[in-house]
Image (tube, rainbow, N blue to C red):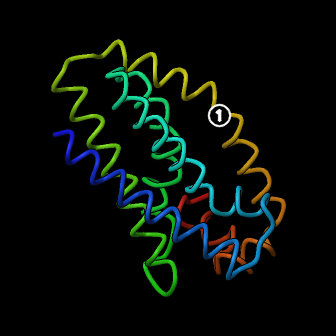
Amino acid sequence: MTLIGIALAAVLLLLTINGTYYFLAIAKVSFLEWLVFNACAPSNITYILCFIIFLLTGDRTVLHIAILPLFFFGGLGLYLFPWTGHNIYAQISHIFMTLNIVWVLYGTFGTGNYKAAAIGLLLGILIFAPFITFQQTYVGSHPEALKKVLGVSTEDFQKKLNM
């Protein structure tokens, strides 16, 4: 089971490197724009670091810390982003973000270590709720940059969410 987790994390790392290359080298966005318009990358990096800590210590708590941003940016990204054009690359990343979540949850149910899951999720909320709030506020206040960099508009997301 650990080999599957390593494979999923390795693919996620490669996708993160690819996405970061696109944003920083091709789209030539600033670090801040990379952080907010490619919020999957910092979420993935966090997960990969937590996964490495888990491999070294066996502590499942750290795996759950990154579940909130993986779900928010990856799981919801599957629904919100279009499945056309260059967004297909983002969707592949979203799929692997979601698969990593499934792997973590499968392992948690298999071990019955719900205390680690609860503590990790609570820590993840404390750590990432401010980041998600900042990211959403920034994207909402820079719709022209969002359209330029990602080719989607805030209206596209609002329509899907029926807002």
Direction bottom: furthest residue: 85
99 with respect to 42 (left or right): left
- Residue 55 or 78: which is nearer the viewer? 55
At label 1, which amino acid type do we have?
A: Ala
- Determine the image quadrant of residue 28: bottom right
Secondary element at image label 1: helix
Q: Is residue 65 above or below residue 73?
A: above
Residue name at image x 70 percent, y 56 percent = 35
Direction top: furthest residue: 115
Q: Position of residue 67 (x, y in %)?
A: 45, 37
Q: Position of residue 8 (x, y in %)?
A: 30, 53
Residue name at image x 49 percent, y 39 percent = 49
- Dot 1 alpha-carbon crowd within 10 angstroms: few under 14, some 14 to 19, many 20 or more: some
The residue where tag 1 is placed is 129
| Quadrant in the picture for the C terminus | bottom right
Q: How many marks?
A: 1
113 with respect to 10 (left or right): left
Q: Is residue 137 above or below residue 24?
A: above
- Determine the image quadrant of residue 148: bottom right
Q: Position of residue 60 (x, y in %)?
A: 35, 23
140 with respect to 40 (left or right): right
